């Protein structure tokens, strides 16, 4: 027994000498005085090569973005939100969304207005997630303190302190749990310090790229459906060709004006977050859904949308004089609804408004080019109905209206889905959404074949070739969507439908689970582990089963006589998902994990689950940890001297580590199997 204990102590010492808290970012903090009453707090992050952190405006379905919280004080008031540079944007196949990230040197800024004539401090916390190609570091609250001079004191812009921040005074790094709070270096920053590196892009090139981007935006999920409303308005606006063209031109000008002018004002007043709010928050998306639903019901003939009689008479009077009020409001509706797709794009471009004069010009040119590109197709469409008016009228006009009604109804669900995802209502899971689309487009195909009739439709003795081919394309699209009900990826429309993670039934996942029960003898993946803490909110990967509380896992491991496989993981850890997909899914690995181990998943970023008061713990800095994620992260750092994920530890029911080294991110399946077997062999000894 003594030999065995000595062996484990030896392994622990070897392991402790090799594991370490990862420190991939150095923080420094500065204060820049802007005038007698305003200052700018500067957060500077220097990331090691290969590492990146995420934007404040990261998609809710993606990784955790950086966030800042300022302690309220009567000594100052915040001016706007924390600004950030333009992030790198890339669609991530693991998260199924666009991920916005930073690398290298990143500067965040927060303007404040000084209300006190005496020196004061600005305190708060910030939190962020870090990742590279092999590891992720879960977010943890970090404290900051800025020392700011009083408003009545003379400015110090001519004093520049180039002293490097030291661990005791400035630089907050991801270090030992003992690192408590940050005392921040206060210094004035020269205006030339943050000049962008490299050559500036030509404004003409920026304009042309923005113009192209605006045109291509026409084909995004939330802009394309605006076509029916635009066409419907200009088809019924006026019989005067000159007045119609004038309205169309003013309609296009209004879109450019709203994008370039009002968009800039909105960002300057409220910050770029306002555009992200319109594009992603559930409230505007729910409003857009209601708008599309109302238009759809109107196009189906349930009711007719009319303005008050007084407004109509006034509009008629203005029409004789070239009144342009109506097209302006149609343009306003078009711009507002399109924000769900254009808002995040514009927001990223407008972030640079708070930096230098050159960047401001680039942003304004970008908005102007984008607005013109976006408005051009709509302006052409606005002029197109005048040509339709000269064509032979008939029942086909009502057919166009009804087809638009089907499209409005289908695309309106996109906005309801965005609100549903934001609030996690689970009303429109992927299969529910697809079922509704299949029915909607199926009925539209039947309508095009003349088998359905609506109010205003004429008898159809036969259908034309164009109508037949439209019906064929529509019904082929319906057939294409049907496999999606069983988990087919449907890449052609992936931007329109909810992510795969919301689908309850996935035939690929079901086959994998069924295969595991046939191939392997009954083990941990198939047996009932009973009532477990947090099992209603947390889940192991498909085909695996385990605990989410280490004490429960230890008690069960003693009962069944097995070692414990601890998985330090995170809900937003892309590298964790890669290990599960490429390594855990291997047949031999899966058999070992599900039959030889008691599995325990410790989520280090699950801070929505509050612990009962009797389970709160106090870390080495005196902070009380009240959430499951913070407790798990502290356990990983304090016990194993590691703060990155994925991180795997094999222990016995008493908590002794059973391997020389713990396992980090490495997709070598044979190496992982050797690691598991090492733990099993030492446990038997």
Image: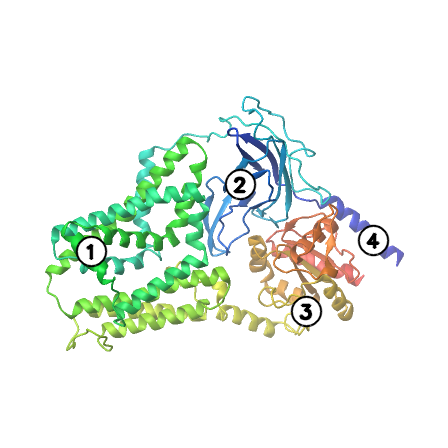
**Residue 235 seen in this snapshot:** yes
> Of label 3 and label 1, which has the lower sequence position?
1
Residue at image mark 2: 78
> Of label 1 and label 4, which has the lower sequence position?
4
The secondary structure type at the circle numbered 3 is loop
Q: Between 391 and 13, which is closer to the camera in this rendering?
A: 391
User: How far apart are labels 3 and 2 at the CA level?
Assistant: 44 Å
> Of label 1 and label 2, which has the lower sequence position?
2
Q: Is residue 65 above or below residue 525?
A: above
Residue at image mark 3: 532
In terms of image quadrants, where is residue 186? top right
Furthest residue in direction top, as rendered = 158
Furthest residue in direction right, as rendered = 2
Q: Rate crowding at label 1 as few (under 14), some (14 to 19) or many (20 or more) other CA atoms within 10 Å.
A: few
User: How far apart are labels 1 and 4 at the CA level?
Assistant: 92 Å
Across and down, in percent, residue 533 comes to: 67, 67
Residue at image mark 1: 314
Q: Horizontal placement of 69 versus 489: left or right?
A: right
Across and down, in percent, residue 384 comes to: 18, 55
Q: Rate crowding at label 4 as few (under 14), some (14 to 19) or many (20 or more) other CA atoms within 10 Å.
A: few
Mark 1 or 4, closer to the camera: 1
Q: Is residue 126 above or below residue 297?
A: above
In terms of image quadrants, where is residue 126? top right
> Of label 4 and label 2, which has the lower sequence position?
4
User: How far apart are labels 3 and 1 at the CA level?
Assistant: 68 Å
**Residue 472 seen in this snapshot:** no
> Of label 3 and label 2, which has the lower sequence position?
2
Residue at image mark 4: 7
């Amino acid at each position: 027994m003594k030999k065995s204990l000595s062996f484990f102590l030896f392994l622990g010492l070897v392991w402790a000498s090799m594991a370490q808290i990862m420190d991939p970012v150095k923080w420094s903090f500065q204060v820049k005085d802007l005038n007698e009453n305003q200052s700018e707090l500067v957060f500077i992050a220097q990331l090691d090569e290969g590492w990146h952190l995420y934007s404040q405006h990261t998609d809710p379905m993606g990784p955790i973005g950086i966030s800042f919280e300022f302690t309220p004080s009567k000594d100052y008031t915040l001016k706007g939100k924390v600004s950030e540079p333009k992030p790198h944007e890339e669609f991530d196949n693991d998260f199924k969304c666009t991920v916005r990230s930073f690398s290298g040197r990143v500067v965040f800024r927060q303007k404040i207005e000084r209300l006190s004539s005496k020196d004061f401090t600005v305190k708060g916390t910030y939190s962020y997630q870090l990742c590279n190609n092999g590891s992720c570091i879960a977010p943890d609250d970090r404290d900051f303190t800025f020392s700011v001079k009083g408003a009545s004191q003379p400015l110090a812009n001519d004093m520049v302190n180039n002293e490097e921040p030291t661990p005791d005074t400035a630089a907050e790094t991801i270090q030992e749990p003992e690192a408590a709070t940050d005392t921040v270096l206060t210094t004035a920053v020269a205006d030339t310090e943050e000049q962008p590196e490299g050559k500036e892009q030509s404004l003409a090139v920026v304009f042309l790229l923005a113009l192209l981007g605006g045109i291509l935006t026409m084909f995004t999920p939330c802009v394309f459906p605006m076509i029916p409303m635009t066409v419907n308005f200009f088809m019924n606006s006026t019989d005067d060709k000159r007045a119609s063209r004038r309205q169309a031109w003013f309609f296009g000008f209004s879109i450019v004006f709203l994008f370039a002018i009002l968009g800039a004002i909105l960002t300057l007043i409220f910050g770029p977050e306002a555009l992200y709010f319109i594009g992603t928050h559930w409230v505007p998306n729910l409003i857009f859904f209601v708008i599309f639903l109302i238009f759809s019901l109107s196009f189906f003939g349930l009711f007719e949308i009319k303005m008050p009689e007084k407004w109509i008479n006034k509009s008629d009077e203005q029409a004789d004089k070239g009144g342009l009020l109506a097209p302006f409001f149609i343009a306003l509706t078009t711009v507002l609804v399109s924000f769900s797709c254009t808002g995040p794009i514009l927001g990223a471009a407008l972030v640079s408004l708070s930096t230098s004069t050159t960047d401001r010009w680039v942003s304004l040119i970008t908005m102007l080019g984008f607005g013109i590109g976006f408005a051009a197709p709509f302006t052409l469409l606005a002029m197109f109905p005048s040509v339709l008016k000269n064509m032979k009228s008939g029942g086909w006009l009502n057919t166009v209206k009804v087809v638009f009604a089907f499209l409005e109804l289908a695309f309106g669900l996109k906005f309801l889905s965005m609100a549903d995802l934001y609030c996690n209502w689970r009303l429109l899971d992927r299969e529910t959404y697809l079922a509704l689309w299949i029915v909607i487009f199926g009925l539209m195909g039947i309508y095009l074949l003349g088998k359905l009739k609506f109010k205003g439709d004429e008898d159809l003795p036969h259908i034309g070739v164009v109508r037949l081919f439209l019906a064929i394309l529509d019904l082929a699209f319906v057939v294409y969507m049907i496999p999606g009900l069983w988990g087919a990826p449907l890449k052609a429309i992936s931007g329109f439908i909810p992510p795969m993670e919301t689908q309850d039934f996935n035939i690929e996942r079901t086959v994998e689970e069924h295969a595991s029960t046939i191939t392997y003898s009954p083990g941990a993946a198939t047996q009932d582990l009973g009532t477990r803490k947090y099992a209603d909110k947390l889940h192991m990967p498909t085909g695996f089963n385990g605990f989410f509380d280490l004490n429960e896992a230890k008690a069960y491991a003693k009962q069944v006589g097995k070692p414990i496989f601890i998985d330090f993981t995170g809900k937003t850890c892309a590298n964790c998902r890669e290990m599960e997909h490429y390594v855990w899914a291997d047949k031999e690995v899966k058999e070992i994990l599900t039959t030889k181990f008691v599995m325990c998943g410790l989520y280090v970023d699950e801070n929505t689950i509050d612990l009962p008061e009797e389970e709160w713990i106090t870390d080495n800095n005196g902070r009380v940890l009240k959430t499951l994620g913070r407790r798990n992260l502290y356990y990983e750092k304090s016990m194993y001297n590691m703060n990155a994920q994925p991180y795997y530890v094999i222990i016995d029911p008493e908590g002794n580590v059973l391997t020389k080294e713990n396992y980090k991110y490495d997709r070598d399946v044979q190496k992982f199997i050797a690691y598991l077997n090492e733990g099993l062999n030492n446990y038997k000894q």
